[in-house]
Image: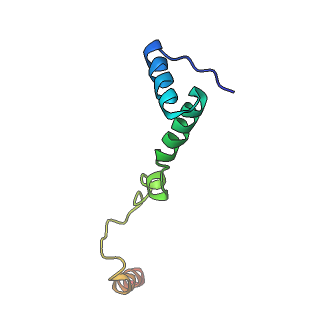
Amino acid sequence: MITLRLDPDLEKEISTVAKNLGLTKSDLIRKSVIEYLGKIESPNAWELGKEYFGKYSSGLKNLSEDRKMILKEKIRAKRK
C-alpha cells in the first residue's frame, strides 16, 4: 500500500480523467504507473559494461585480421 500526496490541481485532473474513462482514481494511477514502468528502458549488456570494454586494449586495430603475423613476430622477438 502506498500513500501519495498530490497537489490539488493534479488531483483534480486525475479525478476528471478517471471519471471520463469510467475508472477509479486508484485504477487510473495504477494503469499509469504500469505503463510508465513499461516504457523505462532497462540497460542492456553493452550499456552496463561499456566503461570496461576496450579498457585494456592493445591499441592495434588489426588483431583479428593479422593475428598470425603478429604472433609470429612476437615469437621471433623472444627468440632473439
- Give the side of residue 48 with respect to residue 25, left or right: left
Vertically, is 77 above or below 14? Answer: below
Where residue 41 appears, as percent x and y from the top left, is 46, 48
Seen at 55% across and 41% down, the residue is 34
Residue 55's quadrant in the figure?
A: bottom left
Q: Residue at x 47, y 24 (%)?
A: 16
Quadrant location of residue 29? top right
Give how far across and how far down residue 10 sits, in percent: 45, 20
Residue 8 place in picture, x, y as percent:
47, 13
Where, quadrant-wise, is the N terminus in this rendering?
top right
- Foreground residue, 33 or 9? 9
Total number of numbered discs in the rendering: 0
Q: Residue furthest left?
A: 61
- Give the x, y percent position of residue 31: 55, 38
Q: Give the camera-side residue of 24 and 44.
A: 24
61 versus 54 height, above or below? below
Compared to residue 35, the image places residue 64 above or below, namely below
Which image quarter holds the C terminus? Answer: bottom left
Looking at the image, which residue is at 51% across and 17% down?
Answer: 6
- Left or right: residue 50 versus residue 35 is left
Q: Residue furthest top?
A: 8
Horizontal arrangement in the rendering, residue 63 relative to residue 38 (left or right): left
